[in-house]
Image (cartoon, rainbow, N blue to C red):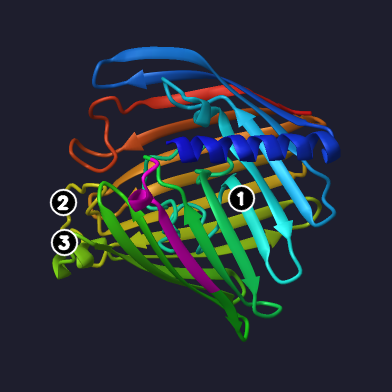
Amino acid sequence: MVGRRLLLAFILISCSLFVIGAAQNPVVEMNLLTAFTYTPSTQQWGNGLIPDLKLTFSSENSGNVRGEVSLGTPAVATPTVDDFIRKAFLRARFPSFRLTAGKTRLSWGDGMLFNAGDILYGSSSVSVDLTQAELRSKTDWMVSVNYPLGFFSFIEAVYLPGKTGKVQDMGGGARFYTNVGETKIEGAYLTKDETGRVHKLATSLQGNIGPDWYLASSITIDQANPSASAIQKSWMISGGLFHMQYLSGDRNLSLRLEMLTRPFGTWKFASQGEASCALLLYPELVYSPASSLSFSLRAILSPLDISTLLTAGASWSVFEGFSLIANIAAPFGESGDLFNWDGSSAAALSLGATWIY
């Protein structure tokens, strides 16, 4: 814990000095949403104001050292200092390698919602807010070194400080990235403590066949109990297609379809659990009839129990940096399905505005 606090203090002091000396104007993002909810299991209506505030200081986009500090309102009930810090990192470009240190996010693999190659944070959970522009935004404290091997190849090593301050709880890994023809290939390894030491292996591919396509696979090996059955259950495969179609005028239509499968999960046509669900789909459609207006439709589908989480939204950019937004979301499924009206599940309508200045 002492070591982590020292690292935190060092990063904050370094970034603060860097920002004071070289930062551009700070960027303030203010999201104010009024939410109306209905919970069928209790037959209760609810409403509330959901503020989301973010203040970002970024260095100038030049030179050998760059940095960013981003502070925001936390999403937890009893936040710590760390919860207010969304990002705080610096990047230094040396003649032969690049160094990143602080709280940030490394993108391993590909996928907006489902990404089996994301062994650093995990991108398989369905507990996400589909109204957000960035569906996966978790960050963590780390130090990484990127060593280029060519124009389109590199090796990246990452160190993750232990949350308890003990040496045996620290994590680390590496990623190899290269291109073969027009196909991107990644291979990654990570070891970390997740209520016990685990080892993770992942590989991913990405290319273009008209639409962009991507595919990833990963397994997790428990160091204390490396059984074949547990490894099989941890095996995940994700993939997706994305295409942007430009229409006449300022109109455009983007289509995305992602899938996540657990080959040794539950393939029965019955109620599914998140940890063992064998197949999940994520379709997304975004239509912009004008540069200032967009409509979106997103869903997470569980085909084996025919349940879904559906979200529809609209955004109108009224003035520069100011937009009005509306979203409606609801689960659909029977009792016991992955998405259902049981417990605290609710339908929600949110109306509000976002301002970036």
The vertical placement of 144 against 135, above or below, is: below
Q: Nearer the viewer, residue 10 or 263?
A: 10
- From the image, state whether disc 3 or disc 1 is nearer to you: 1
Mark 3 or mark 1: name the one nearer the start of the chain: 1
- Region rendered in magenta: 165-176
Which residue has dot 2 on it? 270
Which residue has dot 1 on it? 101
The vertical placement of 161 against 204, above or below, is: above
Query: What is the x, y in percent for residue 143?
Result: 56, 53
Check residue 20 for magenta coloring.
no
Q: Amino acid at mark 1?
A: Ala
Q: Amino acid at mark 3?
A: Asn
Label 3 – label 1 distance at C-alpha: 33 Å
Q: Amino acid at mark 2?
A: Ala
Q: Write the residue at 32% across / 21% down.
A: 39
Residue 24 shows up from this direction: no
Q: Nearer the viewer, residue 198 or 111?
A: 198
Check residue 172 for magenta coloring.
yes
Label 1 – label 2 distance at C-alpha: 46 Å
